[in-house]
Amino acid sequence: MVRLPRIPPRKRCAPDDISGEQASESRLYAFSPETKEKLRKFRLGTSRAKDPQAIIYIIDQKNQEIRPEDGEVYTKMEDLADELPDSSPRFILLSYPLTLKSGRPSVPYVLLYWLPENCNPNSRMMYAGAVELMRNTAQVNRVIEVEEEKDIISIESNLQGED
């Protein structure tokens, strides 16, 4: 009979610790203090908004920094869809006020992960490696992958199902 060595249990992380997966992501990608502050202000400021609000985020390929693309806040989904590139992924923070079927008002705060079908594999991998870090740093409730403009324009139906 072969005896296998006993493997000690994994150390539990305190709630403030970064998980192993996120730790490697945070070494690859970075947020400037200004971007972190913008994320916080957007999250807190949009919870009482009457109109949808969205900001597009990119990963700067030179320094691997995740930052707002242009700082513009979009309030119309059609305008947002028109601004997205046909062949590059993007992160979109979206706060979308709506009334649920039950009649209760809701303001879902989500991360749209724009991943067009024809984007290049390097960009696809870069954004795939950063999606959890973006999700955790932005403190969104859920991530929704979108591939086509019509997915953005009809996002309300997707959000209605969330409850």
Image: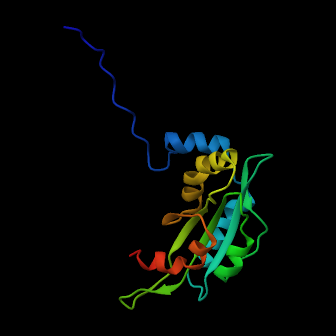
Is 129 placed above or below 10 here? below
Residue depicted at x 50% and y 76%: 108
Left or right: 118 in relation to 105: right
> Which residue extends farthest left?
1
Task: Find the residue positioned furthest to the top.
Answer: 1
Q: Nearer the viewer, residue 151 or 73?
A: 151
Q: Is residue 142 left or right of residue 101?
A: right
Query: How was this image coloured?
Result: rainbow
| Placement of the N terminus among the 4 image quadrants | top left
- 95 or 154: nearer the eye? 154
Splitting the image into 4 quarters, where does residue 5 fall?
top left
At a point 73% along the width and 59% down the height, the residue shown is 67
> Does 22 sit above or below residue 143?
above
Residue 163 percent location from the top left of the image: 38, 76
Measuring from the top left, give residue 58's x and y in whole percent. 72, 58
Where is residue 91? Give x, y as percent.
Answer: 64, 62
* Residue 149 appears left or right of 59: left
